[in-house]
DNA sequence: TCCATATATATAGCATGCTATCTATCATTG
DNA sequence: CAATGATAGATAGCATGCTATATATATGGA
């Protein structure tokens, strides 16, 4: 009984994330996008031309993870890596027109998944859930 | 706005799950366990001798995912696959003494991570968070 | 200037998870 | 009983994520 999976926050987080990813994947696959690509695009739609380092900070993934995601996005013609003007070590990451055009349909698709996921909660519960989740993330991030 | 990562339930779920996994990994690595192995052991500690199919149902992962996890657990001498007496297609999965012995320290380690994650919440908030997470999972599972 | 350190990115290797597909066995029904 | 369809598991191939390490460029101080 030490580990009822329906009561362990860790198990629930893992399960929830897998279901979100599955839902997102099904909804954005027709657009030619994968979940991690979508999250990267969200950051670049907000501000184009970020460096890899800045993307790593914003999405809180490891540098190696981002490097690989960017390689796949380059392969799929979603981004271009350009030499950084002031720093030979850096590149700036730029959206292609194709990626710019995906903004509306992709955010709509992701919005649908979020809406479905939270469909059983009242508006108050949704806000509460997001607030609690943020605080859990903050506690974990402090330590790991 | 459409996708503030601090407000998207999907992003938060992904972020939270990655942090939980990182924390769990650090805490159980000294025991020679990886996160997915731990979750599988939780099910087998509760009931030894389950089939792969039953594990798939209990952890809600795809059959291929479980098959690979079990292969790694076999490699690490945590489980044995035995021929199923009544069904030539099935195997029953049995814990080794090593895996049985890991129950206490591993559940304690996972309990620590959960406690750290929820450390910033009151007891009432913790219950609420788990309840809301379960309902989100239920909504998603209905559809995906 | 030159060296040591720091920083930006790349790469190797692995775990977890998925979809799609293959094989083997079982169960049903004609 | 044989053919058909269903079920259990394995395997291939890929995406995402991690750690560890390598490489290249900057930077700061002797």
Image: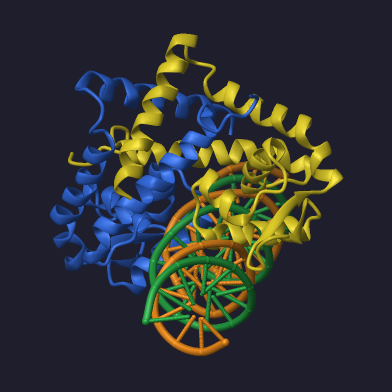
Chain colours: A yellow, B blue, C orange, D green
Q: How many marks?
A: 0
**Quadrant of residue B100 in the image?**
bottom left
The correct choice, above or below, for A80 with respect to A104 in the image is below
Instruction: Identify the residue at image location x=62%, y=42%.
Output: A39
Report the residue at 61% width, 56% height from top: A52
The image shows residue B33, relative to residue A104, as above or below, that is below
Position above or below: C4 against B14: below
Identify the residue at the far right of this view: A97
Coordinates of residue B99 in the picture (x, y in percent): 21, 63
Q: Position of residue C2 (x, y in %)?
A: 51, 89
Judge whether residue B88 can be spotted in this image. Answer: no
Residue A137 occupies quadrant: top left
Report the side of B143 relative to B134 (left or right): right
Residue A9 horizontal/vertical position (percent): 32, 36
Image: C6 above or below C13: above
- Please state, as top left, top right, bottom left or bottom right, where the N terminus of chain B lies in the image: top right
Decide if residue A12 is on the left or right side of residue B127: right
Residue A110 position within the rendered picture, expressed as x and y whole percent measured from the top left: 65, 31
- Closest to the observer, D6 or A108: A108
């Amino acid at each position: 009984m030490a580990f009822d999976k329906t009561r362990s926050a860790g198990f629930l987080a893992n399960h929830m994330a897998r279901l979100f990813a599955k839902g997102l994947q099904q909804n954005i696959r027709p657009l030619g996008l994968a979940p991690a690509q979508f999250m990267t695009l969200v950051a670049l739609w907000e501000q184009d031309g970020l460096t890899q380092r800045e993307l790593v900070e914003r999405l809180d993934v490891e540098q190696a993870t981002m490097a690989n995601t960017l390689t796949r996005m380059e392969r799929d013609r979603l981004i271009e890596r350009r030499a950084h003007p002031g720093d030979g070590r850096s590149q700036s990451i730029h959206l292609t027109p194709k990626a710019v055009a995906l903004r509306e349909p992709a955010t709509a698709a992701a919005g649908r998944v979020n809406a479905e996921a939270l469909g059983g909660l009242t508006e108050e519960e949704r806000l509460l859930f997001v607030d609690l989740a943020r605080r859990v993330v903050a506690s974990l991030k402090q330590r790991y």
